[in-house]
Image (cartoon, rainbow, N blue to C red):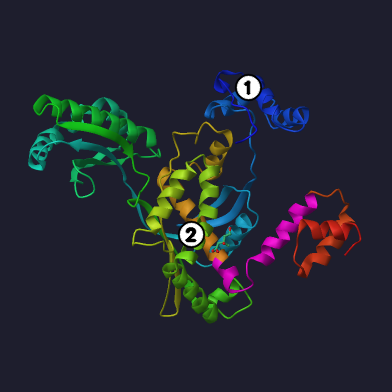
Amino acid sequence: MSENQYFEGFSKLSRDEKLKMLAGTVKDPDAFINELNGYRYQDPSLQEKFDQFSENTISNFHLPYGIAPNFLIDGKLYHIPMVTEESSVIAAASKAAKFWYNHGGFQTEETGTAKRGHVHFLWYGESEELESLYSRFEPELKDRLSDVTKNMDARGGGITESWLSNMTSEMDNYYVLGLSLETVDSMGANFINSVLEKTAGELKKFADEHQPGKLEILMAILSNYTPRSYVKMKVECPVEELEGFNGSIKGIQFAEKFSKAVQIAKSNVSRAVTNNKGIMNGVDAVVIATGNDFRAVEAGAHAYSISHGKPSALTDCKIENGLFTFRITLPLAMGTVGGVTRLHPLASRSLEILGNPDAKELMKITAAVGLASNFSATTSLITTGIQKGHMKLHLENILMAFNVDEEMKNKIRAYFKDKEVSYEKVKKFIEGKL
Ligand code: MEV
């Protein structure tokens, strides 16, 4: 049992009261309150905005906001905002962007923007009866939903498909009414869920009018599995040009080793998951910087990677006729309006830096960063290993914790150039014990 006391009515307290209550659980309450207050904005209207994004807010949590410059995507140059706490991620993406800038850039092959949602319900009757009921309900569906869809319809989106699925092989009496929707420049979660909840209500009403008591709604919710909202993108160059990216091995050797590494990530589950984590290092950083929902993007990407039965790489590599092609197929549900994309001041700035893209363009930008991240990570793995680069940045982070002058920092950097870095070892070095 924890030593903490139950917080009765916590949500009803003012922020100051919440902070004070919480401070009662830590060693130094005054320092705690000062520090947490220190991370709040001086401008009350700005702080109010942040407080309203979520609940029970007591402070702000800051993350580094960086730029990966020079991404050439479909012939257009972007400097891409990324939010990540992990060292090397932005450096790795930037390095790949620089290389591909001189080799044709990132090229989109296909995109899709269709999202899906479902009304899950039980039908206590024959499936033929339900099919007949549904065949009469479906033609009325769009009219019945028009009050929730009219704005989206006017923007060029809305419901594009609907269907009934018999799921009784999974559970007795279980059926699904599915919808496919276009949400234009919004990620669309609120719109889709409103449409689905209204659909559930209308379906129940219709069923009760014609076959009373036979239909029970279980739930209505969008799916974060978005295989039809995706970007397929590639980079491509003659194999001998790959030598320019990592001078340590010849282009052809590099291409062959790289392609084997990708093959492993395709077939070996342990490697696949780590490979995809590396892709998401870049993807999430753009998703967060633009105020999009990284949990949705993560859930969709990992589920897609399992669509052939087990986790597999989201990237692919081909060497054909002396040409090296590296490709990503990434499901993505992102928006440039709605959510906090325009409310969060820095998300809005990110979109401005990107030239205020529409949702599809933002999806391409994000996929390019995912492909770049994976290209750099795989390159490091098949050449120097990742620790060399990581350790350099890790050392810089450690140095920040010590109050030492630049001369000492340089001595430390020189000493650890070819050695393993740790906080304890740096401390010993400073104390003259190494
Ligand atoms: C570390 O955050 C990501 C990598 O492990 C990705 C990979 O192994 O491909 C380097």
Answer few, some or many: residues within 10 Å of disc 1's Cα (few below 14, many 20 plus, some between 14 and 19).
some
Q: Quadrant of ligand 1?
A: bottom right
Residue found at x 53% / y 29% = 53
Q: Are marks 2 and 1 in contact (CB under 8 Å)?
A: no
Percent x, y for residue 208?
Answer: 14, 26
Q: Which residue carries the number 2 mark?
A: 276
Residue found at x 84% / y 56% = 427
Residue 331 visible in this rendered orientation of the protein? no
Asked if 191 appears above or below 172 in the picture, the reply is above
Q: Nearer the viewer, mark 2 or mark 1?
A: 1
Percent x, y for residue 119?
Answer: 26, 37
Residue found at x 75% / y 62% = 421
Percent x, y for residue 304?
Answer: 38, 55
Query: Is residue 334 located in the magenta-colored stretch of the structure?
Result: no
From the viewer's perspective, tell me whether residue 145 is left or right of residue 98.
Answer: left
Residue found at x 13% / y 35% = 139
Residue type (three-letter) at the residue carrying disc 2: Asn
From the viewer's perspective, tell me whether residue 364 is left or right of residue 307.
Answer: right
Q: Which segment is the magenta one?
A: 378-400
Which one is in front, 338 or 238?
338
